[in-house]
Image: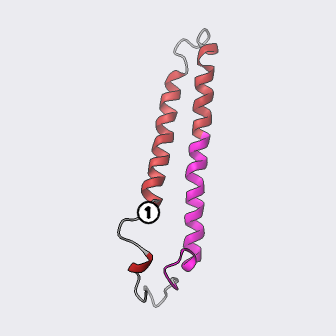
Amino acid sequence: MRFGYCERDDAGFWAEPVNAVTNGAFLAAAPASASAAFAVSLTMRSLDGPLCGVFPLGTHWLWHLLNALVLYLLLRAAVLFGPRPGVTAWSFPGR
């Protein structure tokens, strides 16, 4: 409790409604941005052959670079928003 205010009523997900909604927004943003990055990487991989004559460097390196970004975004979301070891509904006072 800080400044005499505690938003949490119990250990449930909706016990802190503002926090639950903002966490939901972050959870939705990570897979959405990862999906967009994967769509662009797949497009770059598909265009590699046809563009090889025009662009000698090719676009295959973008496939690898963007897939690394996808992996980073998904792993970061898993670390930040995944289950917390040792924190359960039973670890809150009054339960």
How crowded is the residue under tag 1: few (<14 C-alpha within 10 Å), some, or many (20+)? few
Residue 48 in picture, x, y percent from top left: 59, 18
Identify the residue position indicated by label 1 in the image: 83
Q: Among all residues in the image, which is located at the extreme left?
A: 86
Residue shown at 48% from the left, 80% from the top: 11
Vertical relation: 4 (above or below) 90 = below
Residue shown at 36% from the left, 65% from the top: 85
Residue 69 in picture, x, y percent from top left: 49, 39
Identify residue type, mark 1: Pro
The segment highlighted magenta reads: 9-36
Residue 68 in picture, x, y percent from top left: 46, 36
Q: Is residue 66 magenta?
A: no
Q: Main secondary structure of the magenta part?
A: helix
In the picture, which quadrant includes the C terminus? bottom left
Residue shown at 42% from the left, 55% from the top: 79
Count of labels shown? 1
Asked which colour scheme the image uses, the reply is secondary structure
Q: Among all residues in the image, which is located at the extreme top?
A: 53
Q: Is residue 29 magenta?
A: yes
Mark 1 element type: loop
In the shown orientation, is residue 39 left or right of residue 64? right
In the shown orientation, is residue 78 left or right of residue 41? left
Residue shown at 45% from the left, 48% from the top: 75
Vertical relation: 31 (above or below) 90 = above
Residue 1 in picture, x, y percent from top left: 43, 86
